Image (cartoon, helix red, strand yellow):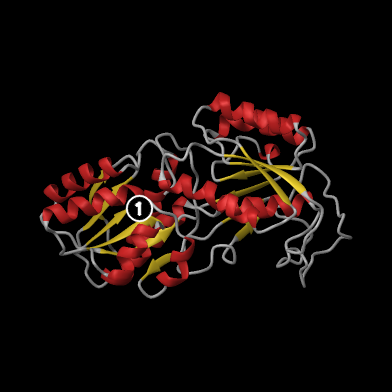
Amino acid sequence: MSAARQRRFRRLMPTAVGLIAAGALITGCTSNTPESNSSGGGNNAASDNDESGDTVTIGFSAPAADHGWIAGITQAARDEADKYDDIDLQVAEGTNDVSTQISQVETFINQKVDAIVLLPFDGAALTPVAQQAMDAGIPVINVDREFDSPFAARTTILGDNYGMGVSAGTYICSRLGDKPDAIIGEVAGIDSLPLTQDRSKGFADALKGCGLKVSHRVAAEFTVESGEEQMSNLLQAAPHLDAVWNHDDDQGVGVLAAIENAGRDEFFMVGGAGSANAMRHIQDGDSVLEATVIYPHTQAADGIKLARLIAQGKSMSDLTSQGVPRRIMLNAPVVTKDNVDEFIKNAFES
């Protein structure tokens, strides 16, 4: 998934396959600021939303690209902005230093940009400066790691960690539900993070639904090295496995290396986040990895699109209600060999 050392992520929702944007689960709608209707009110059902409009300047800030998912999220934001000739995207250099990121947002405020898309390194620490931007009349789109206050963002777009666990567990149930003694392994991410706890809870809840449970669990650190080390430990502790869920495809590079080194192939594995590397293994059928669960790195790209709509006073074309929703939670579909072609073109590289 997303993650570097210090991530305070939140998480997504279950279910099986579905398009990320189309599968959006939308909630809330109590703006603290009156919505303007410069497009004349109502939605744009037959939508002219993609047609060129007034040029808007969007400031974008995210953590340093020290993990495949984060690198993917920034590139996706750039790629999305490039599709529109009416977006002037100002990208601040990625940083894991909270003070530097606060300074970047202050610069955007002073430049009077039309909107800010912000994936904070630390949601709580960036809340005051995001609130400052909102108070200055600049809509903030909060991506992935939530602020402490709902008033610090015009719109929040999130993945669903609990849902990732549910999707992984549901898939394993579909394969092993008739095998009550199945031995299940789990390679989590950093255990102290809420995102990891949410993923593990969703996984356990889904397995419980078909009478299964996790027999062997280790926690890595979202890195290749830690994934290899922890999977080696798990394999030594478990002489036989039927299935494994690895939370993160970046650490999964190391997890697969450990499996190959051990010469084990009696089980199948489900990954997490949805990297291109993982999907190529799924396509080729050359490893125990037969599925992965998406944690969309396209959240920032969605944030760019929403920022443009808000700055141009437009609504979402597929909704009847006016305005862009206050909160959007994205889907966590399962990618298998049957549908990998649908997802791999938008995947990030680990």
Q: Quadrant of residue 224?
A: top left
**Point 18% across, 54% down: residue:** 259
Please provide percent x and percent y for residue 288: 23, 63
- Asked which secondary structure carries label 1, the reply is helix
Please provide percent x and percent y for residue 163: 46, 56
Q: Nearest the camera: 226 or 169? A: 226
Please provide percent x and percent y for residue 88: 71, 47
Q: Which residue is mark 1?
A: 249
Q: Quadrant of residue 318?
A: bottom right
**Point 66% across, 32% down: residue:** 105
Q: Nearest the camera: 313 or 163? A: 313
Report whether residue 219 is seen: no
**Point 73% across, 61% down: residue:** 316
Q: Nearest the camera: 134 or 192? A: 134
Residue found farthest to the top: 99
Side of 277 where 138 appears, left or right: right
Side of 69 where 232 appears, left or right: left
Q: Callout 1, which amino acid?
A: Asp
Q: Is residue 283 above or below residue 151?
A: below
Side of 125 where 282 appears, left or right: left
**Point 66% across, 28% down: residue:** 128
